[in-house]
Each structure stands twice: as structure tokens, then as C-alpha cells.
Amino acid sequence: KIQREIGKAAEGATIEFEKNRLGNLGVKEQVLDRINRKSKTDTGAGYDIDSFEGGTVGVNFDRFIEVKATTGNYPVFYWSENEKAKAKEYGDKYFIYIWINFGKPEQQLIESIQNPYRQIVEENYEKVREIITWRVTWDKRS
């Protein structure tokens, strides 16, 4: 429950960060209001936030953000197979935003990894440890 609450709060902080980032690029307020928390309506999307790259903003989203947050000061995160597949599909349009010390006075967004599929998988990032998790619903009544 606490992790879900931190996740939602980090997504909200990311939307505010995106509004500031795009606002500093001169993007109009009505476009900033279109930044979308995708995770609210589609938990299987493989990312959390629909946003815009900036510069010339079109009608379609062109930045897809997966938000990772920790209350600690060292960035360790889990990356699902679905998130990895979406990162591969979207390439340079996919980002992982990493927050540390979330909910503390020293909270900060320390990194935005553009095209994490390339940086983590294709470039064989050495600090990756693959794990397999299973989600099981156990009900022998049926």
C-alpha cells in the first residue's frame, strides 16, 4: 500500500516536472494540461505518463515516461517485461524518470534515462540482475 502511494505521488511530481520543463520551452498552458497520467486508466500500458518532447508540439504524445521512485538515496528499481517491451517499441520516445529520497526534504529527480532499452539491454549495462517473479492467485475451490 505504501509503495502504491509513493508511486502515485511520484507520478504527480513527474507531471509537475514535465509542466515546468515544457513551460520553460515556451509550450502553451492548454498543451501542458494535456499531459496524461496513463497509469490511472491503463495499468498495462508499460509506462505511467504521456507527455511531449517539446519544441514543436503536435497533437500526439511523443514522450512516454515510466516513473521509478524510492524513499532511499540510492536508485535501485525493478523493470517489468512489459515496461521493457514498451521501451523497445518506443525507442528514443521512452524515458525512465528516477526519483530518490521521495517524500523527504531532499527529494529529487536524479535521472531521466532516454531509450532505456538501448542503454540497459543493448549496451549490456553491467549493473542489471535479471530476476523472475511469478504472480499466483491460489484458489483451489474452482
Image: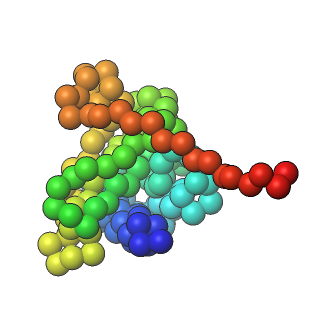
Looking at the image, residue 90 sits to the left or right of residue 19; the answer is right
Residue at x 21%, y 76% (from the top left corner): 104
Q: Residue at x 17, y 78 (%)?
A: 105
Q: Position of residue 23 (x, y in %)?
A: 31, 63
Residue located farthest toward the front when viewing the structure as drawn: 140
The percent coordinates of residue 141 (x first, y second) are: 82, 55
Q: Position of residue 44 (x, y in %)?
A: 59, 48
Can you say whether 88 is above or below 34 in the image? above
Q: Position of residue 78 (x, y in %)?
A: 36, 46
What coloring was used for the rendering?
A: rainbow
Viewer can see residue 8: no
Badge count = 0
- Dividing the picture into quarters, in which one does residue 125 lie? top left
Task: Using the image as rendered, state which of residue 91 and residue 85 is in the foreground.
Answer: 85
At 25% from the left edge and 23% from the top edge, which residue is drawn? 124
* Drawn side of residue 121 relative to residue 40, left or right: left
User: Splitting the image into 4 quarters, where does residue 121 fall?
Assistant: top left
In front of the other: 24 or 42:
42
Q: Is residue 89 above or below residue 103?
A: above
Task: Say whether residue 87 is visible.
Answer: yes
- Indicate left or right for 48 with 114 as reference: right
Residue 116 placement: quadrant: top left
- Residue situated in front as seen by the camera: 51 or 125: 125
Quick one: which residue is furthest to the right in this view?
142
Q: Which of the two residues, 115 or 52, is positioned nearer the viewer here? A: 115
Q: Which residue lies most toward the bottom here?
A: 105
